[in-house]
Amino acid sequence: MGLELGGSVSAPPPRAVVSGETALVGIYEISKLLASANRLENVLAGVLTLLSSFLDMRHGLIALLDAKGAPEVVVGSGWSEGAAKVFFDRLPERAVGQIVATKMPVVIEDVAASPLFEGVDLSGWGTQDGQSFSMIGVPIKDGDNVVGTLTVDRARNNRSSVLFDHDVRFLTMIANLVGQTLRLHKLIARDRERLMQESAWREKAVGAPEAKAEGLKGIVGDSPAVRAVIEKIRIVAKAKSTVLLRGESGTGKELFAAAIHDQSPRRGKPFVKLNCAALPESVLESELFGHERGAFTGAANLRKGRFELADGGTLFLDEIGEITPAFQAKLLRVLQEGEFERVGGARTLKVDVRLVCATNRNLEEAVQRGEFRADLYYRISVVPIFLPPLRDRKGDLEMLANEFLRRFNAEQGGKLRLSESAMGVLNECGFPGNIRELENCIYRTATLAHGDVIVDKDFSCRKDGCLSAILWSGSSSKWPAGTTPLPIVAPQAPRAPTPPESAPAAPVVGETCPGAENCTIIEKDPRTDYEKLVDAMERAGWVKAKAARLLGLTPRQIGYALQKHGIEVKKF
């Protein structure tokens, strides 16, 4: 464990007091040795050997202690490696404990007469049995903690009182140098272990077999469509490129964005998210860029924005397609330059942020209509990832349903499970609202279930009360007796919603919502949305409220549809 030296050596004649110049030379030589790239035990043993050249000493011991005070490393000068450990164990616990507890040097002028060594066998310490000797011990510190001790002993002489004063100061300086070296060795060892763990993780990730969706936190499913997305996420997560998640509402964009962050080298840094459609432009600017104190009414204190909070990590901007053209220009500058100013501030701030965006809008059409900047589109759509709707995730429905039921049981303390007939009902449903609609269906059915096993009769669609079917079909003609239909609330965001494949159609005589059967929408009108909208407006005399009633929509939805298709309202 230490540098093996010869057996005990004879005591040299007393040296003169260590002068300032000699001490400086000794510190210089020892500091060079401590800076060398050798094993720690060999370096410490070399330090003791150099000390014997500058001090009147027979033996020296350096002991490094663990958190419990037990010796981890013991090296000696004037003893063999095994003897160093033996003689350290012979040091009374009272003497070592006093150095550690007081964090101060201990000087024992006559070891044989000291109460600290009372009852200790001193045979073998001196060159002759019974020879009187002295001892000096100083603490080795890492900051304010004692991590070891440095002790030397020497034969007593008439100049001891003079030598003690100078030697204690000299040994304290050497112990401080040793403490700094120990701290550097610990930091290097910690970094080496971290690098080895990261290297092993990368090798494991590269050599791993085909990844399954369960490997990503929060994502449930093992269909080919999901596995393809997972594989792409694992690849793009390693880079810094901006990712655009695209897909219908309710496909789990936020979970996939978090998965990109967790799989990236930035996973130890913040993951910050913001829904751009939830805030007006003035508030959105303050949320993203922050504001200075007094920037506007109510800005009592300086506030950091989401870009600053996500520095070094990932920023997820949901509903990116809803921001106004004016704000698009401000966001473009941050993406291009990586810098911005807080609202009301003049100081330019630079950040390192990986951006992940999401939208369910057709941005290409928005660019063509001039609603979305083409330069911003190319900035955010470096790597587009299309998330599959639930209807394309064959085989995942049962796993998702059981997962939502497991969460319900955990929250409510229940033991519900799905029967085969219940799964049959779920498999028949198209779920145009995707995973969010499935979760709503499971929670509603589990709440109203009569027993511990959910059967087909427990579902609302088996009782003529499927709210989702009524919502997506625009029909309220088949409500269960004694109930009042809730109003269908239009989206809050000022945008033209992308209609699902089962878009609302003008009701046909004799045609009702098929939700009482399986919640699917059967489109029988071969006309396009544009043709149906123009026909309804003409029949309503170009009054949007009347056309909305004909199509089973709200006036606001009619307004969005007219804007989307570029239909100008005729005025009479």
Image (spheres, rainbow, N blue to C red):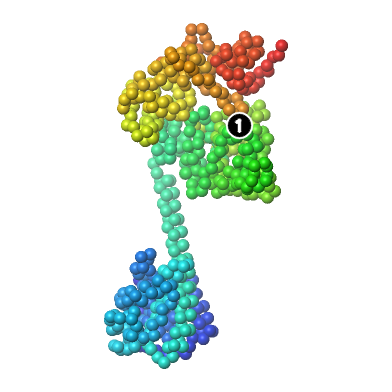
Element at badge 1? helix
Q: Going by the picture, which residue comes out furthest to the right?
A: 572
Q: Residue at x 52, y 28 (%)?
A: 248
Q: Is residue 2 visible?
A: no
Q: Residue at x 45, y 38 (%)?
A: 231
The residue lying toward the viewer, choosing from 351 and 232, is 351
Q: Is residue 324 visible?
A: yes
Spot occupied by residue 174 in the image (x, y as percentages of width and height): 47, 76
The residue lying toward the viewer, choosing from 358 and 413, is 413
The image quarter containing residue 72 is: bottom left
Q: Which residue is mark 1?
A: 322
The residue lying toward the viewer, choosing from 138 and 177, is 138
Asked whether, in this view, residue 372 is left or right of residue 218, the answer is right
- Counting other residues with Cα less than 10 Å from the Cα at mark 1, is it few (<14), some (14-19), or many (20 or more)? many
Asked whether, in this view, residue 506 is left or right of residue 341, the answer is left
Spot occupied by residue 162 in the image (x, y as percentages of width and height): 46, 88
Vertical relation: 67 (above or below) 17: above
Spot occupied by residue 165 in the image (x, y as percentages of width and height): 47, 84
